[in-house]
Amino acid sequence: MKTLTAGLAAHIAGNATSMATCLKLTRTDGLVFGFTNHNSDLPIGGVTYKTAPGAVMTAIDSKAGLQVDNAEMTSFFASAGITEEDIRSGDWDHAAFRLFRVNWADLTMGEEKLLKGRLGEITTHSHMRVELRGMAAALNANIGRLATPACPYSLGDADCAVVLTDYTAAGEVTAFTDPREFATDLATSSVRLSPSATGVPSHDYFRGGVLTWLTGANSGRRMEVKSYAADGTIELHLPMYSTIAAADTFSIHAGCGKTREADCRDRFDNVIRFGGFDLLPGQDVLRKAGGQ
């Protein structure tokens, strides 16, 4: 049940209203943005809601059970000055949102809460469309661990606990080939190859690792590494949306093959944290019969 202030309830029940819809977005990097379909900016709760008059929102599909409440907004991002580059680069992935209405003529009346959750699918062809998915969407996520032979943890996360400092190198682009492959000076860098040895990174040392851009058009963005050659050439899993240029700098950390002996034990001295189930019998063993 919605709770409104007496003043706002009386205003909505009147013959004419001066209501404006506001959308507050909080990105995963902590940046906060506010937008409204009113024809001028609205300062609410320490956030300035910028006017985005081109935004068109569908009706909110809301149910009494645990089904996901959702709505769609078209042309909103374009009206708010958010570019296709921002979207394709992942800056807005999983951003939290709060949708509400206010009386723009008297902001002291409070707000009418409409929907809260996270952004869903964003499409950019022909026009920009963003899906607003309610809080119940989180109930659709799978919770628990999968019993797989390989370790499910990401290198350096809380479950793995490997300190990445010695396995991280700083590099610079020396030649640009295409949006996801380029030459670097990493062939002369020094990293930890094993618990007792350091040296230049070997072939595919950074495979499966993460590259973070420090300067250039992609500064602050990250991408997983698909392959690494001993001459310093890097291939990313996906192309960077912004142009990569010579002299762009980055940091990159080693990848992990997720195996017990070759990686957790011999490479990172972290076998106690191995999270895979490589000794668990598979279907082929369970289905054996007689002398098979």
Image: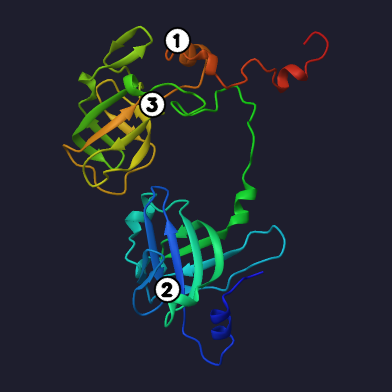
| 88 lies above or below 215 | below
Please name the amino acid that badge 3 sits on: Arg
| 149 lies above or below 117 | above
Label 3 Cα crowd, 10 Å radius (few <14 / some 14-19 / many 20+):
many
Residue 55: numbered disc: 2
Residue 209 in sight: yes
Q: Quadrant of the rendered structure where residue 212 is?
A: top left
On the image, the x and y values in percent for residue 222 come to 35, 40
Label 2 Cα crowd, 10 Å radius (few <14 / some 14-19 / many 20+):
some
Label 1 Cα crowd, 10 Å radius (few <14 / some 14-19 / many 20+):
some
Tell me how far mark 1 sits from mark 2, CA to CA. Answer: 56 Å
In the rendered structure, the answer to whether residue 101 lies left or right of residue 213 reads right
Q: Quadrant of the C terminus?
A: top right
On the image, the x and y values in percent for residue 136 come to 63, 55
Q: Nearer the viewer, residue 110 or 120?
A: 110
Residue 127 in sight: no
Which residue is labeled 3 in the image?
Answer: 207
Secondary structure at badge 2 equals loop
Which residue is labeled 1 in the image?
Answer: 266
Identity of the residue drawn at 32% across and 44% down: 240
Q: Residue furthest right?
A: 290
In the rendered structure, the answer to whether residue 167 lies left or right of residue 176 reads right
Q: Earlier in the sequence, mark 1 or mark 3?
A: 3
Please name the amino acid that badge 1 sits on: Asp
On the image, the x and y values in percent for residue 275 come to 57, 22
Identity of the residue drawn at 37% across and 23% down: 164
Identity of the residue drawn at 82% across and 14% down: 289
Please name the amino acid that badge 2 sits on: Ala
Secondary structure at badge 3 equals loop
Q: Earlier in the sequence, mark 2 or mark 3?
A: 2
